[in-house]
Image (cartoon, helix red, strand yellow):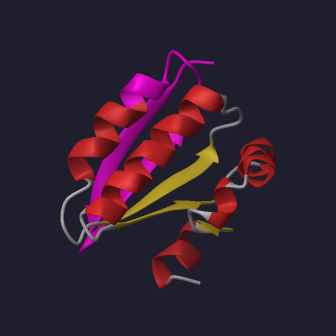
Amino acid sequence: MDFSVSASCEGNLQIVTSHGDLDVQAAPQMLALLMPLMQPGSQTIIEMSGTQFMDSSGLASIIEAAARARDVDGYLCIAAPSGRVERVLQITGVDTLIDVFDSLESAKLGR
């Protein structure tokens, strides 16, 4: 499945929306979009309901961006992961490192 990723702003929140398979081919695209957003004090939500598959390369791109966010006192979380993506986050323990919310609305509220 083709991958696409886009970003938009809602007030001080940056919303990144991904669609398609976040795999070895798509991970550089995800990272290229995320890294410039990781600025001091930034708040970024990755909305992943349209991402049905994520491999280790895709996971690594998100982990790298989250580490950068922490380095600059920013914040990055994941919202509405599909069942398969949520399972990858759980199996790898990434859900203990990065906040994962059931919906975009709950991510915006921080709970």
Q: Residue at x 26, y 55 (%)?
A: 38
Residue farthest to the front, as pictured:
71
Above or below, 60 against 109 in this view is above
Q: Can see residue 2?
A: yes
The answer to which image quadrant residue 99 occupies is bottom right
As drawn, is 104 to the left or to the right of 87? left
**In this rendering, position of residue 52 left or right of residue 46:** right
Q: Is residue 78 above or below residue 32?
A: below
User: How many numbered marks are there?
Assistant: 0
The x, y position of residue 44, in whole percent, is 37, 62
- Residue 20 in view of the camera: no
Q: Quadrant of the C terminus?
A: bottom right
Q: Is residue 78 magenta?
A: no
Quadrant in the picture for residue 74: bottom left
In the rendered image of this protein, does residue 91 appear above or below residue 96? above
Q: Is residue 22 magenta?
A: yes
Which residue is pictured at 27% across the width and 71% down the height?
73
**What percent of the width, then of the height, locates residue 84?**
79, 42
Q: Position of 90 compared to 100: left or right?
A: right
Kindly identify the residue that appears in the image at 36 percent across and 41 percent down: 6
Image position, residue 55 (x, y; %) = 67, 28
Horizontal and vertical percent position of residue 53: 70, 32
Q: Quadrant of the N terminus?
A: top right
Q: Observer-nearest residue: 98 or 21?
A: 98
- Residue bounds of the magenta highlight: 1-29
